[in-house]
Amino acid sequence: MNYFALIPAAGVGARMAAGCPKQYLPLLGKPMLRHTVEAFTRSPLIAHTYVVVSAGDGYAGDVLPADLPGVTVLRCGGATRMESIRNGLRLLGGTIGPDDRVLVHDAARPGLTPALTAKLIDAAGADPAGGLLALPVVDTVKSAAAGKVATMPRTGLWLAQTPQMFPYALLLRALEEAPDPDAITDDASAVELLGLSPRLVEGHPRNLKVTLPADIRIAEMYLTMDPET
Ligand code: CTP
Ligand code: MG
């Protein structure tokens, strides 16, 4: 069984509102996507890394040159994250075996480390339902539906991160069969709709998703920290 990384990087970063898609913003002088890709190329457990960008992307060629070992850029991005991932998986049908594991990881999470990837693979690499990094909720959770504020029990609540890892054939089937795939915001939820329970493996705050302008400095702070933490 081989482990492959699939990085969706075809978003526009609307909430970041920068002059370019956020995955190309510099963090400590290096484009965010390059940090993210290197988290996998530095991992001995990952056989190859695929990066999905949009067909008209004008940055990927410089950030991920064609001779970069262990990395292939796929220009098949779609209108949503799920569509980008589905397009990438379809293209890789002849390359990745049905039981090989695919680790889907957001380009916008540059703080991933080989140690966290190894923790996920150790805990869930052999699980037929797959698994994902996630963080237990530590804050008190409020709901404010229809003007009524209430406090929700937080026992058993987790915040999903990526990588989210599944057997190739299972993930492709889950995304093909999801009733409204574009309403799904993570890969695990598509697999859950098939009646399976992916394993939750505790991640780390350094693996935050860079979404808003204020996240840039936080991501840079974590990137200066020891990657074994
Ligand atoms: N993504 C993608 N294809 C899309 C939309 C998103 O590959 N059509 C990727 C993004 O590039 C990112 C990951 O999915 O790495 C997580 O999405 P998100 O953080 O929402 O990024 P954006 O969609 O770019 O940001 P925003 O929602 O603020 O526009
Ligand atoms: Mg988005």
Image (cartoon, rainbow, N blue to C red):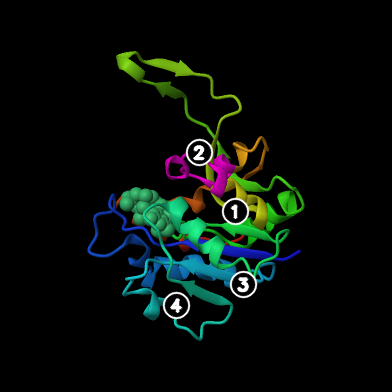
- Indicate which disc residue 48 carries: 3
Residue 214 in the image: x percent, y percent? 31, 50
Up the image or down, 82 lies above or below 68; here it is: above
Q: Which residue is mark 2?
A: 179
SS category of the residue bearing label 1 = helix
Q: Nearer the viewer, mark 4 or mark 2?
A: 2
Q: Is residue 73 magenta?
A: no
- Indicate which disc residue 22 carries: none
Specify the segment rendered in magenta. Answer: 176-190
Q: Main secondary structure of the magenta part?
A: helix
Residue visible at 61% across and 72% down in the picture: 48
Q: Nearer the viewer, mark 1 or mark 4?
A: 1
Up the image or down, 194 lies above or below 37; here it is: above
| The image quarter in which residue 29 lies | bottom left
Marks 1 and 3, how far apart at CA: 18 Å
Marks 1 and 4, how far apart at CA: 26 Å
Marks 4 and 3, how far apart at CA: 14 Å
Q: Which residue is mark 4?
A: 64
Residue 34 in the image: x percent, y percent? 45, 71
Marks 1 and 2, how far apart at CA: 14 Å
In the drawing, does residue 12 fall left or right of residue 135?
left
Amino acid type at circle 2 is Pro
Q: Earlier in the sequence, mark 4 or mark 2?
A: 4
Residue 197 in the image: x percent, y percent? 67, 37
Q: Which residue is mark 1?
A: 172
Amino acid type at circle 3 is His
Residue 190 in the image: x percent, y percent? 56, 42
